[in-house]
Image: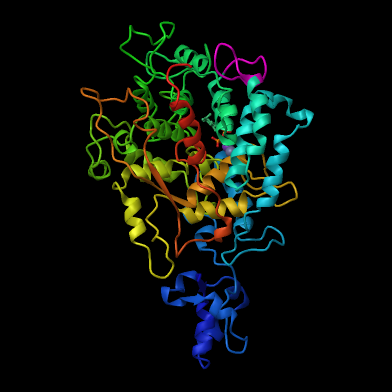
Amino acid sequence: IFIRKFPKQKGDMAAASNPTSQEGAATSTSSQQQQPNLDAITDDDFEYVDEEFVSNYTPEEAVQPQPTEPMIPDLFKQPPLVKDDLITDTSKLQDQTVEHCLPFLAGQDGPLELNDYGLPRLNREKHIKFLKQSLGPLPGRFVGMDASRPWFLYWCLSGLTMMGEDVSSYRESVIATARTMQNESGGFGGGHGQLSHLATTYSVILAIALVGGEEAYNVIDRKGMWKWLCTLKQPDGGFQVCVGGEEDIRGAYIAAVVITLLDLPLDLTPESPAYDGGRSNLLTGMAEYVRSCQTFEGGISSQPNNEAHGAYAFCALACLALLDNPRRIIPRHTDTQTSRQLTALSSPLTSYLDIPRLVSWLSYRQYAPEGGFSGRTNKLVDGCYSHWVGGCFPLIEACLSPSGSGSEKENNKTATSGLAAAPESLYNREGLIRYILSCCQDQTKRGGLRDKPYKMSDAYHTNYVLSGLSSAQHQWDLDSDPLPLPEGETTPTMAALGADSIWNVFPFIDDNDQVYEDSDRVRPIHPAYAIPQKNVAGIRAYFQGRSGFA
Ligand code: FPP
Ligand code: K
Ligand code: ZN
């Protein structure tokens, strides 16, 4: 039996229980009816109603409590109450963005059917159709995106997978396409004859993992990949994104993904710029490189001394989470009391980020009333940061939670719903979900998801908005404690210390704040690889089975 909460309006209750009360009549203007004072609603105004029970009642018997208007908290209905007096181009754009978002947040985006909380449903059919179309031949104006063809594969297959589609029927076409993109010198380019790049290599490998199957895995030239990665490895621990290209934190994250998914040998070839006679390997100095990208703001930049940006915060956390157990490697001791509390579980020698500062920076990324995240200080909300910023929280929450909290949660099932009580979050999940469902869906027949209202939907935003929705709708628990590091080591030089971490996932159920129906929950994806756990397990199992380059 599903138990569901219906909000009741304070005014209705007062009128029903005390018909002689003048108070309601005297103060109730029509505009107040449209805008009930939500602050005046207390917990007593909510009750559990058994839907089955209600539906078996005749209308005369049952007064079915219905909200008179969608339950939208003021936080998501009004411009910010505290504002800076300084007016600049930046502040004007920010104000304009709020003006654009408010009607969508208030459920006034056309004649849509809204749920009790004022939110449109996830328009799966339209988004699925949009992604399937984006996988097919694209019009001529997309010629500039030619080198991004592998990205389209990943974005579309990943988005479809999260919405519950079986993408194995794309296996043959992914195999044929990937073959043309692979270079003899290792790695994948954006198309036939294009230079290998880590970004295109990452998206081809994830696309292969998503369609799955030995024939697809077998396309990857592991030996070439290993040699190529060795030529990208730099003496300071990081990776260039292509031969002679820039070294940045995307390179480090993607290298960690490729090394662990393909179970590559870690030895460096003598051709590697980082080769030092056998003391260093592919992982040496990588975590230090990640640390060097944390900025004065607490966020992470693409390279040391650049501006902190959400996309790089995800790369940093996910990279560390693949190198070692996040509980050990992510936090770093500092002298403040908060830091001591937050890093109580970690060892000072082996952890790499100042988490209190990073959490502070990440928290500043979530805006009200928009509810979504921006990518950097003084910039605008954008749906894709639902993943780049939102995707940081499962990694941070997991590394700060006590070990084994997943199984504890199972035992704490509440009697009424049979579901786990919602733990606290480091960000406002309701706000993000409101932004995604209200502002990021293209409700025309085009479908797809987008940056913000009045922007065009595209495959990139469709995928990353859905990834962000997925992380907001799930709770991840790291179920493994750090294994001891090898004798004398203070830094990860072994693959799989992190990639082997066991993660448990639960639907995030919040009895107070779940503002969407369970049918609008998308599938979970691995917090660091950003594809489902079963696809990670499939490709890893295939390559772990082979020693050397047979
Ligand atoms: C700014 O764009 C965007 C960046 C500085 C970084 C973008 C990088 C990624 C999205 C992904 C990197 C990760 C991998 C794994 C390849 P903008 O100025 O248009 O947007 P903004 O105003 O929101 O900052
Ligand atoms: K942007
Ligand atoms: Zn974006």
Across and down, in percent, residue 201 comes to 56, 23
> Up-down: is 352 above or below 54?
above
> Up-down: is 413 above or below 391?
below
Residue 405 visible, this orientation: yes
| Front-most of residues 38 and 474 | 474
Whether 188 is among the magenta residues is: yes
Across and down, in percent, residue 230 comes to 45, 13
Left or right, 521 with reference to 322: right
In this view, the residue farthest toward the right is 140
| Front-most of residues 91 and 396 | 396
Residue 28 visible, this orientation: no
The kind of secondary structure the magenta stretch mainly shows is loop
What's the residue at 49%, 89% (across, down)? Answer: 17
Write down which quadrant ligand 2 falls in: top right
Whether 302 is among the magenta residues is: no
Report which quarter residue 61 is drawn in: bottom right
Left or right, 420 with reference to 93: left
Left or right, 529 with reference to 200: left
> Up-down: is 289 above or below 332?
above
| Front-most of residues 430 and 81 | 430
Across and down, in percent, residue 308 comes to 44, 32
What's the residue at 73%, 39% (across, down)? Answer: 133
Across and down, in percent, residue 452 comes to 62, 46
Coloring scheme of the render? rainbow
Magenta stretch in the rendered image: 180-196
Q: Report the number of discs.
A: 0
